[in-house]
């Protein structure tokens, strides 16, 4: 026997020793009685009638059959329990993915709703001529809303064990691309400059650069909203597929 096979056998025996020992004991007791090993048979004759030597053949047939039946039942039950645990574990993973998808879907839906309001705000501001008439409430919170969405997205991607998340990843890239285009136009410096004039109730006319920024931002907000709509559809489809896998 090679060293690898011998080592594997020793590991197997060590791992299953508490399962092997009871069956070994059950097998050895009749041998001790029949062969009178260590005078075990002589000692036990004081209590029971062992029987004639000719009866041992029938005994061993019945006895070994019983042991094999017990062993089969034990192994079968153990395999069923192992399979059940594996199924429970896989189901727990799926449920965790499902919960994560729900959270991502909520964040994506909120982002979509928020971007819709932002788009409407830009559309509204395009028609204004004075700084004191501008409305930029949603503009100031876009960074915070996007950060919350990205946090939920990153968590979901870490949790997913499924292979069919590529659509989610690709669609998120489109959202990020549109978002970056928007914030490049509507940058912090521009926001602060306009915000200060609004707070001061400035009656100045909106400069051409700012008007241009509003028009560009309006188009970019529309594009971002479109991508948000697509993303929620992709995540919702992924969620429905996950539900089917769990219930099937």
Image (spheres, helix red, strand yellow):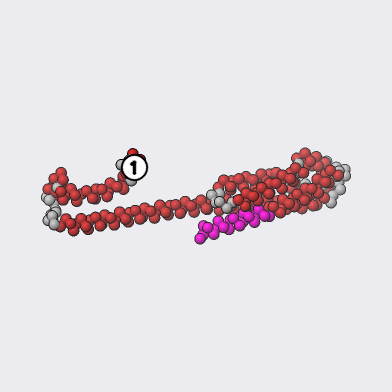
Task: Give the left or right position of residue 214, taking residue 158 as reference.
Answer: right
Relative horizontal placement of residue 128, taking residue 98 as reference (left or right): right
79 vs 28, left or right, is right
* 10 Å crowding of disc 1: few (<14), some (14-19), many (20+): few
Please tell me which residue is depicted at 83% across the width and 44% down the height of the picture. Answer: 210
Quarter the N terminus occupies: top left
Residue 70 image position (x, y, % from top left): 29, 55
Residue at 60% over, 51% down: 166
The reply to whether the magenta stretch includes residue 232 is yes
Task: Answer whether residue 68 is visible to the viewer in this image.
Answer: yes
Looking at the image, which is closer to me, 177 or 106? Answer: 177
User: Does residue 199 appear anywhere in the picture?
Assistant: no
Name the outermost residue toward the front.
Answer: 2
Of residues 178 and 12, the one drawn nearer to the viewer in this rendering: 12
Q: Which residues are magenta?
A: 229-248
* Furthest residue in direction bottom, as rendered: 248
Residue 226 spot, x, y in % from top left: 71, 54
Give the total number of marks visible in the rendering.
Answer: 1
Residue at coordinates 20% horizontally, 49% vertically from top-left? 29
On the image, the x and y values in percent for residue 22 come to: 27, 48
Secondary structure, mark 1, is helix
- Residue at the spot x=54%, y=59% of the render? 244
Give percent across and percent down for residue 194: 81, 42
Dominant secondary structure (helix, strand or loop) of the stretch shown in magenta: helix
- Membership of 5 in magenta stretch: no
Task: Give the residue number, with chain letter if any, for mark 1.
Answer: 5
């Amino acid at each position: 026997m090679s060293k690898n096979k011998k080592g594997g056998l020793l590991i197997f025996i060590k791992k299953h020793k508490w399962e092997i020992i009871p069956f070994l004991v059950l097998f050895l007791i009749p041998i001790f009685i029949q062969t009178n090993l260590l005078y075990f048979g002589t000692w036990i004759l004081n209590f029971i009638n062992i029987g004639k030597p000719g009866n041992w053949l029938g005994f061993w047939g019945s006895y070994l059959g019983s042991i094999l039946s017990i062993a089969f039942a034990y192994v079968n039950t153990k395999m069923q329990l192992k399979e059940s645990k594996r199924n429970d574990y896989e189901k727990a993973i799926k449920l965790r993915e499902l919960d994560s998808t729900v959270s991502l879907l909520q964040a994506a839906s909120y982002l979509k709703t928020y971007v819709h309001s932002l788009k409407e705000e830009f559309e509204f501001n395009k028609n204004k001529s004075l700084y004191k008439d501008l409305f930029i409430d949603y503009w100031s919170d876009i960074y915070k809303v996007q950060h919350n969405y990205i946090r939920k997205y990153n968590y979901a991607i870490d949790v997913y064990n499924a292979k069919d998340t590529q659509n989610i990843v690709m669609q998120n890239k489109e959202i990020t691309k549109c978002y970056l285009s928007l914030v490049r136009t509507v940058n912090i410096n521009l926001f602060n400059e306009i915000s200060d004039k609004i707070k001061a109730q400035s009656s100045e006319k909106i400069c051409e650069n700012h008007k241009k920024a509003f028009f560009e931002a309006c188009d970019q907000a529309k594009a971002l909203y479109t991508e948000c709509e697509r993303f929620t559809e992709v995540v919702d489809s992924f969620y429905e597929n996950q539900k089917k896998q769990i219930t099937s």
